[in-house]
Image (cartoon, grey):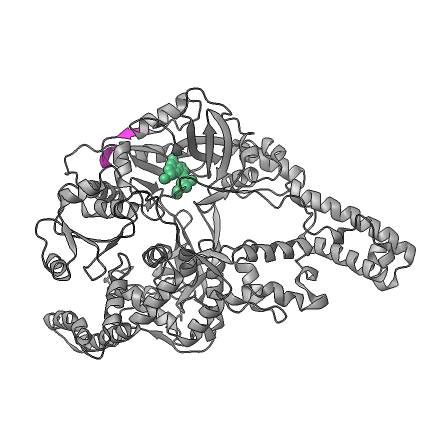
Amino acid sequence: MQAAEVKVGDLTREEAEAELARLARKIADANQAYHAEDAPEISDADFDALKRRNAEIEARFPELKRSDSPSEQVGAAPSEGFAKVRHRVRMLSLANAFEDDDIRDFDGRVRSFLNLGAKAALAFTAEPKIDGLSLSLRYEKGVLVEAATRGDGAEGENVTANARTIDDIPQRLEGAPDVLEVRGEVYMSHADFAALNERQAAAGAKTFANPRNAAAGSLRQLDPKITAGRPLKFFAYAWGELSDPLADTQIGAIERLSDLGFSTNPLTTLCDGPAEMLDTYRAIEAGRVDLGYDIDGVVYKVNDLSLQARLGFRATTPRWAIAHKFPAELAWTRLEKIEIQVGRTGALSPVARLQPVTVGGVVVSNATLHNEDYIAGRDSKGAPIRPDAEGRGKDIRIGDWVQVYRAGDVIPKVADVDLSRRPEGTAPYRFPDTCPECGSDAIREEGDSVRRCSGGLICPAQAMEKLKHFVSRAAFDIEGLGAKQIEAFFHDDLLPIREPADIFTLARRDEENGLRRLKNRDGWGETSAANLFRAIEERRRIPLNRLIFALGIRHVGEVAAQDLARHFGTWAALIDAIDTAFPAEERHRKAEEAVLAERQAAEDVGRRARIKESRDAVWEADPALPQAARDAWADLIGIDGVGATLAVSLISAFHQKAERASIDRLVAHLTIEEVARPQTEGSPVAGKTLVFTGSLEKMTRAEAKARAEALGAKVAGSVSAKTDLLIAGPGAGSKAAKAAELGVETIDEDAWLALIEGH
Ligand code: IVH
């Protein structure tokens, strides 16, 4: 019998000694395979089992413990992964478009932002959107010094050693600006992908699902020798920090990059407007099958770089570019079941369980059905969708033959139903009116297309989804604690995580569990447990915007969280505003409810409109309402991008007892960093609150606002005591009057331009 199969309690001394030697070797080999090579030889669970067995034998025969004992090697593990790199210029993503009209709208939006007439010349480049992963290459004095992946856009991974192994990436440049960050896409060709998978399969190593995954897996190898053996390619299409401009135009900059020795995409075309852009799109789409590498659309960019600079960026995407994705792919299959998932805000979402079907090369077995109206065949206003011959909306039933639609990486959806293939004896689907997870009433509010569980944090599904959101990438982003681990910890009785604060007590609670500590469990080991606790420790410091977003409050997405963080600066200021505004919010909400009830009763449209107008007057005149509450409310809803719906959601969340207590417990563990403000050195308007009113002539309102924000100002929608400056164009009305009344400084557009000139 092999010693490995003998129970630890039955081992003789000699057997134990031999077994410890064998385990030390196996664990060392597995460590090497895991950290330095591509394919781990054994599963995590088996690895942990080896370490456990080793620890048990050492506990029984302490005198036999080896000098190279694997149990002593915590923290001495090989490289923990890649070092982080902070991007000096954020790496952004692109907004998506699917229809031809979206492209005309894009041209229209650019024109309106820049105040260009419909006739003015406005050129765009069109080029394939490569389906790979983006990489930023930093050259200093012509020498490649750093290569970083995109990561979350602000911070990526340092993959310099790997990038040096890619033939398309020059190590040195002649005649380049002193500082030059070249950005582009790493990808793998179809032929190289097929050959790589064959090699992998022959070697018994893992194969990749598609070229994109293969490229990503190859670039993110800890051992550059492995990357060197992988046939990666690189197209340059953009840039980050620059000491000198590359050119005046996008197309010129691409030519310059090509002259410097980079591969640029040969299909890049200069177009004089939407018609040519769409022609180019169709030409690229037609040639797609013969390209030999994957593309998933066409990217259009404003050609004039000075216009790009004026257009600037939204939160995560440039205003001057858009990705026109190739159309979705369709397939028909049987709808086997409808399941209801309960989301983080209690929304009940119907999910179609389908007979698996291949849609555009991917096997789909689940698809969204949106909401109860969608299943019933009507839109949110009650109008029919999927009309039949008589114009009635077709409903979707279990057993139906349905069409599945998939566009890019978007969640597939059930798009249509074939009534001619409907089985006998089916009945319309009945949407549940109680929560399938906790049994609470599931309520659909007036004006909401979604039915929601009213259980709040007592609903386990909501609590768990909130936690998953909390650890997600744009929120706390804790390495080693993803959705899968959250589910396991949520159901764990020994070391549970039931709310965010529990994450930060995990390590301490684990220490109290003696022999049953995390590191001794299946799927965990000394290293992985230590890494998790370290990753959690690192996140005790958190930027304010991430914290706000992480709370998972309805309507408070990444952008709104950023707006709130910028406006209030600190957690204390935010809480103070929320608490101060509470009485106003309550009144606003009650008035709104009353209005909704009244409107439901009112038949004629004119009366409905009048009811709406009178809404806020109801409580604004209430003398019992403290002025501070009124001001705090006005300040909150005056933040551009906030508004009453979001404010209600935010304040209600903080005034639900259980939720507030949970937030307070969390915050006690954190150090909250102020949000990083834009570079505003010397800015004349940094930290000031501005309001624009009337018509501007030299800049559109959108551009003025973007400029002001880039200079560190807050732009509000209405004038209040907190307004520092009103910029009033011709036709300024009540806002100018109010500013005069409050003694707020008011200037015209020319004075505004003079003020910001040169900044
Ligand atoms: S431009 C500031 N051009 O698409 C915008 N991106 O969905 C910089 N991509 O993260 C991107 N081909 O990884 C640009 N020709 C192309 C591209 C391209 C692929 C990727 C890139 C980006 C993603 C956005």
| x, y percent for residue 750 | 14, 42
Q: In which quadrant of the rendered view does residue 512 lie?
A: bottom right
| x, y percent for residue 719 | 18, 59
Side (left or right) of 148 relative to 222: left
Q: Quadrant of the N terminus?
A: bottom right
Is 442 covered by the magenta stretch? Answer: no
Side (left or right) of 170 relative to 245: right
Above or below residue 592? Residue 36 is: above
Above or below residue 293? Residue 721 is: below
Q: Quadrant of the C terminus?
A: top left
User: Which stretch appears magenta?
Assistant: 269-276
Tell me if residue 188 can be seen.
Answer: no
Where ligand 1 lies, by quadrant?
Answer: top left
Q: In which quadrant of the rendered view does residue 520 lie?
A: bottom right
Looking at this rendering, what residue extends furthest in the bottom direction? 624
Nearer-the-camera pick, 690 or 98 = 690
| x, y percent for residue 226 | 62, 35
